[in-house]
Image (cartoon, rainbow, N blue to C red):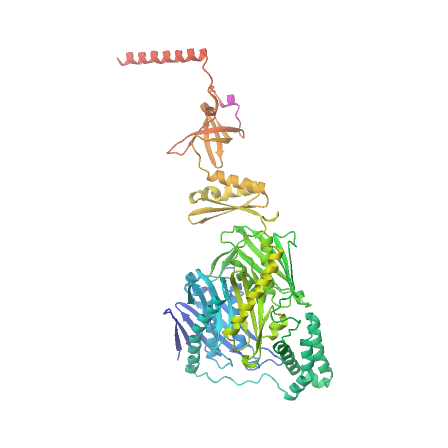
Amino acid sequence: MINAITKTIELSDGRTITIETGKLAKQADGAVVVRMGNTMLLATVCSAKDAVPGTDFMPLTVEYKEKYGAFGRFPGGFTKREGRSSDYEILISRLVDRALRPLFPDDYHAETFVNVMLISADGVDQPDALAGLAASAALAVSNIPFHGPISEVRVARIDGKFVINPTFKDNEKADIDIMVGATYENIMMVEGEMNEVSEAEMLDALKFAHEAIKKQCIAQKELTEMVGKTEKRVYCHEDKDEELEKDIWAKCYDKAYAFATSANADKHDREEKFTTLKEEYIAAMDPEKAEEQAVMIDRYYNAVEKEAMRRAILDEGKRLDGRKTTDIRPIWCEVGYLPGAHGSAIFTRGETQSLTSVTLGTKQDEKLIDEVLIKGKERFLLHYNFPPFSTGEAKAQRGVGRREIGHGNLAHRALSRMIPEDYPYVVRIVSDIMESNGSSSMATVCAGTLALMDAGVKIKKPVSGIAMGLITDKGNTKYAVLSDILGDEDHLGDMDFKVTGTKDGITATQMDIKVDGLSYEILEKALNQAKLGREHILSKITETIAEPRADLKDNAPRIVIIMVPKEMIGAIIGPGGKIIQDMQEKSGATISIEETDKQGRVEIAATNKVSLDDAVARIKAIVAIPEVGETYEAKVKSIMPYGAFVEFMAGKEGLLHISEIDWKRFETMEQTGIKEGDKITVKLLDVDPKSGKFKLSHKALLPKPERTEEDKKRDERRRDDRKENFRKDEKIED
């Protein structure tokens, strides 16, 4: 017997979201179906009963998957089934994970799996905006401990008005597009892109989103009561020893605090000193007891180290490397470092460094996007790589992880709107992190800007980025906002807030909150402080290269765009692609053509001017319209008894009759001396309106010879002969 329970949420524009539980996946700890219009998501959550011994973190896994059958499509590939997660699915998984993870109890270490699946779609509503709500609702109807609920919404500004969860079509017009995750009380996660908006406008968007989230959180709490899951499971995943904890704090805190305030700018030296302090404590213990309590020692010592760092900042304003809260680490930049790349740059800030290259390509280099609901082409690509050597780790690099995809996407959002809409090149940026100690994604944004300008890409404005941090005490009575955070400040702090923008406004942002209770006052201070940091970094970028280079590098492809009438596309391509292939082979250029706005868009690319000019000339010759009275340089294609067929324009042939070759009379074509392959100048006399055949003449371009006495006598004899023949015809008729 199915006993489905449903809860409905009404949006401000009248649309509704329903949450249903009790019908599908009943053996999971929690399962719901979230529906908006004809878009449906199934979210399930399962958590192990006990933690794996020795686990001192939250082993949470979030997977978002879109089923092709949800939209009535077949997957691609040989197997015709869903494969590994796409970049888009990974990005949505990360969004949900970042909002959920901080809200599990600190001492809850059981393996937990959250799966969200798109099971129905109509291509109207965007399912990613519902994924966070679905995941949280699944937790709400389970007995898994969770300090939620949360929800996520997309907030967009369209024609000056904020909209919650806009449709695909409406979102295309948005100048603000942000995903926001929050509890009823506080914002937990932000990610999105903007068209150079102010800090105040961004705050307004967050507040608008939060009001919608509050309604969704209330609905989930009511759903929890309806299913009778207000009591959560009892667990014990951490061994505790209060005497050991007190002893570690007593013997280690003062030394850790001294290290934290020593202004040591060397990351590895700092790590070594903190590690040595822990090892000294362990060395003083009974070896057997130390081994037995190793997990607890690590946990208690990490708490000591964290508190020492935080108190040093809150009480004395001293950061680990000696900077003030608003200070930016030293910056140096260089462009043109890689001679073989179309553009390149090095951006170094403290112990974080990015080596970035730019490659310019043609239409054939476009990335094809074939997701369940998203199909199209991408002309701006950004890839972020984080090799282990960047942090001094001795391990192999095993492909691209979720972190690389997430950081690359943030940098992509930051720069994409600065590429002109009509820019003819496909652009690929690759950022390889050479060193890392905090905000390598922001280094990618800065290095990307430098490399684009070095490549001669006419970006609208330079973009810089900065990562902000936050340290708070209990109750948030005291806090410090940190500019340009270190890796340790990110790990031990309460916020990681990345902001990118131009001199005129914000272009992208990503924020993760690790504490409960972050006021808009703190957010506003962080945004304003970030603006000052961005402006400082931007000044360093423009000192290195103030604007894009006037021209492309010598090894970069040159592209010319020619718009042709729609009906000429077939003439350029030719039967079976014969003509366009021949042009590419003979010119050495790459030619692409597509129909757009009822016109043909021909893109011609080559690495040298000769090839480019040759291909352009061939295209223009094909699309040119022959004009009566114009003179053309023609090539003899074939000889006939009555004349020669000549090609006077690319793809256009006409008959040069034997009588139109010269003023003198020829009885045979051999007498003319014309052969196949010869070049001859011709004049277009006429175009047959019915057949479209061209009448050509070489004679018309030659001066008409003066008439001799012999010519006059011959003409007179011909006239006499015609008169005589006329009289004979009259007599016969009589």
Quadrant where the N terminus sits is: bottom left
Q: Position of residue 542 (x, y in %)?
A: 60, 57
Magenta span: predominant SS is helix
In the picture, measured across the screen, residue 722 lies left or right of residue 416, that is: left
Residue in the foreground of this view, choosing between 699 and 717: 699
Q: Is 38 inside the magenta-drawn segment?
A: no
Decide: is 298 above or below 533.
below
| Residue drawn at x 66%, y 84% as measured from the top left | 249
Q: Is residue 636 visible?
A: no
Magenta span includes 670: yes
| Position in image of residue 129 (x %, y %) | 46, 68
Can I make out residue 279 in this image?
yes
What residue is shown at x 57% (from left), y 69% (from top)?
Answer: 468
Residue 125 vertical placement versus 233 (above, below): above
Q: Residue furthest left?
A: 734
Q: Residue at x 56, y 62 (%)?
A: 411
659 vs 453, nearest the viewer: 453
Compared to residue 289, the image places residue 544 above or below, namely above
Q: How many callouts does the rendering have?
A: 0
Over which residues does the magenta segment extend?
Answer: 669-674
Side (left or right) of 344 relative to 202: right
Q: Position of residue 416 (x, y in %)?
A: 52, 58
**Toward which corner of the image does residue 247 lie, by quadrant?**
bottom right
Most extreme residue toward the bottom is 243
Please tell me in which quadrant of the rendered image residue 609 appears: top right
Q: Position of residue 623 (x, y in %)?
A: 46, 40
Which quadrant is home to the C terminus? top left
